[in-house]
Amino acid sequence: MDKESLTAPVKTAVDKFQLVPEFLKVRGLVKQHLDSFNYFVQTDIKKIVRANDRIQATRYPHIYIRFLDVRIGKPSITMDGSVEDISPQTCRLSDRTYAAPIVVDIEHTQGSPDNLKKEIKRNIIIGKMPIMLRSCCCVLYNRDEAELARLGECPLDPGGYFVIKGTEKVILIQEQLSKNRIIIDTDKKKNITASVTSSTEKIKTKTTILMEKEKMWLELNQFPKKVPLMVVMKAMGMESDQEVVQLIGRDPRYSLLLLPSIEECTKNGVFTQAQALEYLDSKAKRPMFQNTQAEKEGRAFSILRDVFLANVPVHEDNFRPKCIYVAVMIRRIMDAILNEDAMDDKDYVGNKRLELSGQLISLLFEDLFKSMTTDVKMVADKLLDKSDKAKNFDFSRILVSRDNISPGLERTLSTGNFEVKRFRMQKSGVTQVLQRLSFISALGQMTRVQPQFEKSRKVSGPRALQPSQWGMLCPCDTPEGEACGLVKNLALMTHVTTDEEEAPLISLCYSLGVENMEHLSGEELHTPDSFLVVFNGLILGKHRRPRRFATAMRKLRRACLIGEFVSIYVNEKQCCVYLASDGGRVCRPLVIADKGISRVKAYHMKELKDGVCTFRDFLRRGLIEYLDVNEENNAMIALYEEGATLETTHIEIEPFTILGVCAGLIPYPHHNQSPRNTYQCAMGKQAMGNIAYNQLRRMDTLLYLLVYPQRPLLTTKSIELVGYDKLGAGQNATVAVISYSGYDIEDAIVMNKSSLDRGFGRCIVMKRYVAVRQKYQNGTQDRILRPNRAADPGGNMQILDDDGIAAPGEIIKPNDVMVNKQSPIDTQTHGSIANLPDSAYRSSNSTFSKCHGGEVVDRVVLCNDKDSNMCIKLLVRHTRRPELGDKFSSRHGQKGVCGTIVQQEDFPFSEKGICPDLIMNPHGFPSRMTVGKMIELLGGKAGVSCGKFHYGSAFGEASGHADKVETISETLVRHGFNYSGKDFIYSGITGCPLQAYIFMGPIYYQKLKHMVLDKMHARGSGPRTLLTRQPTEGRARNGGLRVGEMERDCLIAYGASMLIFERLMLSSDPYEVQVCRKCGLLGYYNHKLKTGVCSSCKNGDQISTMKLPYACKLLIQELQSMNIVPRLKLANA
Amino acid sequence: MSEEENSMSEIENQEQNGGVPDYIMDLEDVPSKLPSHLQVLKTRVICNMDAPQHTDTLQYSGVYAALRVDNSVRLDSFCNNFKVEVKRFTDDDIEFDMIGIDPAIANAFRRILIAEVPTMAIERIYIANNTSLIQDEVLSHRLGLIPIDADPRLFEYPDNAGGENNEKNTIVFKLHVSCKKGHPRITVKSDALKWLPNGSELIADNTKPNADSKAKTFTSFSCSQGSRPEFSKKPPGPYNLDIILAKLGPGQEIELEAHAVKGVGKTHAKWSPVATAWYRMLPEVILMKDVKDDLAEELVSKCPVKVFDIEDIGKGRRKATVVNARACTLCRECIRGGQEWEDRVALRRVKDHFIFTIESTGALPPDVLFTEAVKILEDKCERVITELS
Ligand code: SF4
């Protein structure tokens, strides 16, 4: 027996599940948004202000204003001069923006230019910052359930969104290629390129080096054509070719590849730095306006310094770091040429950065702040020029009067059009309205990752599931169709990092033995065994013992001496150690293992359970750490402790956390065919149910609620973590899998009428109507009158209350008046407005025109809108029971409409007297392969018979978070059911037993928002479009149903000519025209003479009357207007 | 409970002898009985592992004509063989065996019980005030589903009165609860429904009150229902007093009037007098071979409802016997485990023996429900006969 195995410590499988809820407790479900916003509010905003802290007058530089500090205050609103604290719920209800003042302390000069006094002012408000809910500035921060309830907020609501003018807006997570990193790729012509997207505070540029026709070129925006790279190297001071070769590495293969480029350089006659700069000057783009300073140094020089690889800093015109950087890029291109594997994968998650709301807002704020400072400066300059004003000049007063920050932020967040002029950045659709269709849809939106590429591209690469997405992005949750695979969702345990201070880390690296590259010759840089150390894309230097260095750094991180999200990644192939502390990387927690033995022991978990320690303590004690995608490459991660070997460095916490929030609802997803889970992820967002605990206090435009929502009988751990068991969206229906009545083909389901009678699938649809009591510019305003119910000819004033507004609880009939409003006829002229007579008003009632019957006024809310007009919001409630054609779905991507509703006595019943709620066709199973649904049925059936919820977490069988089919079957047998869940069933119609055992049991069914009532449409005659006089299109416009091309073909084939004539002309747009038989043009009918007249022949001699489709007449006339004359030749038929 | 099947007597006239002359039937070599294997198929459902077989009954009188066996239904044999045995009888449910009847007729009773036996249920709600959380429609729906403890036979269908709501077709209840400010939340249960024997107290507002007469309400009772003797003993009300209707927070109030009318389950499940009514065929478990010793133990332990037991047959040997076939739920555990088990145990169902269960919602006792159902079927038959004649 080998000794090592005997001395090895004992492995014990520890149930680490408890870590997941603990993790989510500290993190919440949308921590990435909150963290990023908190970072902005606490750190970034201060940095931005510090970087632009001084405004000074151009002519009098000693007149200045200096920002000392910036803070975000408490969310409040200023109403008529008084400041009032606000809560998100009041903002939602009264259409306000949930924002807090941006407060600055300033130091400024006061008095006339010659007699200046310094003064410090504190707490000056320069604008308002919309506040993310539950961030550290929000009133909901760290509140417990009772306090949240008092604020009218749902405790399960994750926060992470903004309330802008009463609507909830989310800033979606944006996916981008990582900045400041070298990416090796091929371009369209299959040339190998190395590109860097540099992004600094000052500038954003893209530098590309490529190998074309065996020569190296540089592509940069400032050079209209690509320029030879060797010239650039020379221009940066690398005059000696040998030095370049040394920098790249002395491998003869590299030199061979480089030779053509060097020759090219010689051919161009460039040998010295001066020559090179001159050469580049000639190639550079002419600047739009002359910049004197740049002109002095030479344009090429400034381009190379400021634009070319802008992320590499140039101190005192020392270009060496840039040279080394270029050398590394060249080296990597050559590696890629020599060895295909060295190519970078653009779709690799490690090369991606997720941009979160904090970053976007910070960019926006910086832009707005800068434009504010320039604005203030301009105004100050103008004022100072006028000598009289300059006497008593107060800088701070201008500052207060300029508020472009709040409207700028508000506009961007509410429209989603994101524009930063400095970087010529323009994005649209950055923000979206938070979908409150169901609890899950809101959550799903908070974890959605929006791609930066255009969606129309027909490439499969970025859409494919990347192995590096494991554990970071949900493999199931992506939409179907054009955005498939591009829009992604975060997995349950993913964390997105925020920026971390770089300077201390860099100095730490140097003290851990990194040799500064400044002190190294090109030769030394690439000695074998020494690795380059790259920090956030910046080459720091090299290290002779890279693995030791990495271990040291990791030790420091595990001891929490450096940030827990710093990633250390040793790339053996590129001989580099990559350190990253930048924001936007995705990472996730893992249990650390030493030689395959988990550091988390049972007693740790017990401490966690007893509440002695928290997730943070686990991090602090070095039991758990966060790994990002790159560092995962250095780790050996075992799925379970049992599978760990000696090489294992980490162990997964729980396998089901690779799924996201939406996919977490599916029971037994690992038994389903994969696309089914994807379908359910899309459908779970359309399911009706509960939205939030405060759902009945909300005034959303459209709200779908289930009357009797239930929690699923077959739950998963994710469901409990997310809170779906408290805000469910579905009902447990007893399903029998039989084909029944033929009305269940194509996935239709047959429903039991008695179940519907008893409340199955009943839902409430709430719709908001708004009426505004408008104030007009002449001082008049709308008035709301007490209805005169006695004199009410149409009978549509009956639901009005004495205040002239529809009363809550009243049942609405079509065309009922909701607000008995009158508007003044004259809203322009100014005059006496005190007592306008009744005759000066006209009725401007708002009515309920579209009405199904049975709608009820639920609530009436009065509030002031932003122009302080009185706003009357009515919420109209409609309770619907399921009807033929309503859409239902189980949690396995199996949607179907209700095909027929059958009386209970006709339904089959079991030995135990159980009658199913709905019948599903067994043909839904073979092609869909949703085995998970079958297990759900079994588990649900066992659950109801033994009285306990069963679990079906993904991949949970091994760790006990999903019940095994065998144990479920045993439970079933114990309670007298068949072990396979198939019951002996009697037909309800004949009374005889069915000739098969029927698979029957409860399955959680969701009612989807698509209901027949909202969709059905037919019309006889109705509105027509103005231009062509043909019937309008679409249900919203009460349009006609089109006899289309294919229908027409059928009729032609059938020979039903008169039917075609009737459909296409008589029922559409018949029109009588006067045609001149002589010239074939259209004439007109003269009503005085009662004859047709031809306007070109100027007489009415040979006029015939005929019928044409109006569209045809229109075509003829439109052609005439384009100098084409269609002539009609008439003949006797 | 042994209700005579009157309706069956009508068929008597049409009874034919299957066209077989009597003397032939008297001949000795004519089989008067089916061979046993056919007899099993005729009278039993064979519950195999994969699927039940021979589930339907053979209606046609001449199916066994070739065997000279008459399959027609004979009234006298029916009368002699039909039996009803009550096994369990409580206030809310009844379980009885119905033996010697065709599934079609047993099913007819079941269907009638579910859909056609009338009860009283709340149909119209007049809400005067509802400031509670629960929506008017949802509250109304919940009220409608409350079983009303009132004998429907004492009432008429509403359409008989031409749309008028009088004391013969309407029971009026009142619900008025409020939660005072500063008090804890209260739960409104069905016991809060109060019977109004004099009819509605709410004024129908679209009628102008005449000076002379009383203001018009939603009902027009000519006399108080309280004077009816049936009601003075047991006033109508909800059968279950602990059904949660709504929850009220401080300052909330519900005031409404609920009118219960007569109806049938076909229209809406709230009028269904049964929670459910169903039957199952009598299980028959037969050991085809002797199952002995360890196998017997195994068989006994297999069955979750203890259908089998062990009998000592001496010399330390044991044998499995069927002791409680009635309890069999047809879980097929005993025949799971290979073909040999399927050969050992035969699971069957007796086609003309129904274990009928009625769970009443409370309006009528379960036994009365069944007699009502029988009466309805009788009516139907009579209607068919009068239509035909
Ligand atoms: S079918 Fe099930 S209940 Fe019936 S005898 Fe067999 S094991 Fe027992």
Image (cartoon, coloured by chain):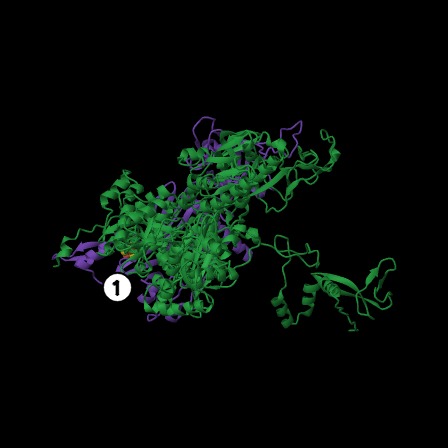
What is the number of callouts on the image?
1
Q: Colour of chain A?
A: green
Residue shown at 27%/63% (left/top)? B342
Report ligand 1 position as a quadrant: bottom left
**How far from the left and from the top, in percent, is residue B245?**
46, 37
**Residue A721 point in image, percent of width and height:** 36, 45
Front-lying residue, B330 or A170 = A170
Instruction: For mark 1, name the chain.
Output: B
Q: Would residue A189 be found to the left or right of residue A777 on screen?
A: left
- The one nearer the camera, A574 or A990, is A574
Q: Secondary structure at mark 1?
A: loop
The residue at which mark 1 appears reads as: B338
Q: Position of residue A265 (x, y in %)?
A: 44, 67
- Residue A1059 percent coordinates (x, y): 67, 66
* Quarter the C terminus of chain B occupies: bottom right
Instruction: Tell me which chain appears purple.
Output: B
Please say if A936 is above or below A708: below
Q: What is the crowding at mark 1: few (fewer than 14 residues within 10 Å), some, or many (at least 20)?
A: few
Q: Note whether B209 is above or below A343 in the view shown.
A: above
| Residue type, mark 1 in image | Gly
| A824 left or right, relative to A226 | right
- Residue at (44, 27) in percent of width and height: B183
Residue A29, quarter of picture: top left
Q: Can residue A257 be seen by looking at this rendering?
A: yes
Q: Nearer the viewer, residue A32 or A711?
A: A32
